[in-house]
Image: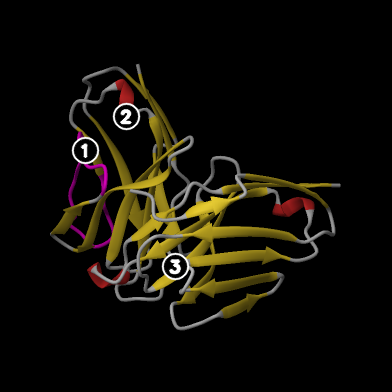
Amino acid sequence: SQQGEEDPQALSIQEGENATMNCSYKTSINNLQWYRQNSGRGLVHLILIRSNEREKHSGRLRVTLDTSKKSSSLLITASRAADTASYFCATAGLTGGGNKLTFGTGTQLKVEL
Amino acid sequence: EAQVTQNPRYLITVTGKKLTVTCSQNMNHEYMSWYRQDPGLGLRQIYYSMNVEVTDKGDVPEGYKVSRKEKRNFPLILESPSPNQTSLYFCASTPSGKGYGYTFGSGTRLTVV
């Protein structure tokens, strides 16, 4: 069963602009993670935010988490053509040691020159 | 280099012919998992293993088997593949406990005709 739902499903922006993707989920979580996938390749872990954190930064990435609304956002600042990929949020639940990740359906980001 | 290695990368097979997709990780991770990715459905967990000889069903286990005889290896077995198992498969691993991201393999694109 899917836990996360990303919004929008697809996003097209110009290089240098910021890209924002949103994720909503249904049940309580231990942490939420964001991954990037380039065209049919393996997913790459970008950032993890714990349920007691509200905001986290990593380079050009900024993630926020609002557990009261069960939502998260991923902001990519000053986007580059190389950022073109699909982005997935994934939630780790409270049981099973917190290892099981449930993924959303992803946002396809296209950054044009 | 820390990695998860899947083989083969591409596989075309016929209905009913048993096959195995191998997965190996060199990071001494306790937790390993198999996912399938289908358009519009995101990634869905097939099976997971919390350690050697400890495996359990994920969300879509029907038609699949796994084993975990050694910590580094977690093969996925399709005893009698059917066309609805045509998909992109990913193996992933992570340390046990909470708060770690997954490392994914490069994927296996399976076509069952």
Chain for disc number 3: B
* Image quadrant in which you'd find residue A101: bottom left
Q: Which mark is residue B85?
A: 2
Front one among A69 and A7: A69
Chain for disc number 1: B
Horizontal and vertical percent for residue B108? 42, 38
In the rendered view, tell whether residue B14 sits above or below residue B63.
above
In the rendered view, tell whether residue B81 sits above or below residue B74.
above
Label whose residue precedes the other's in the sequence (2 or 1)? 1
Identify which amino acid the numbered label 2 is placed on: Gln
Q: Residue at x 46, y 74 (%)?
A: A68
Label whose residue precedes the other's in the sequence (3 or 1)? 1
* Local secondary structure at mark 3: loop
Identify which amino acid the numbered label 1 is placed on: Tyr
Q: Which mark is residue B64?
A: 1
Front one among B30 and A81: A81
Residue of label 3: B101
Find the distance from the CA under tag 2 to the CA under tag 3.
Answer: 27 Å
Chain for disc number 2: B
Q: Which residues are magenta?
A: B59-75
Find the distance from the CA under tag 2 to the CA under tag 1.
Answer: 9 Å
In the rendered view, tell whether residue B36 sits above or below residue A15.
above
Mark 2 surroundings: few (<14), some (14-19) or many (≥20) residues within 10 A? many
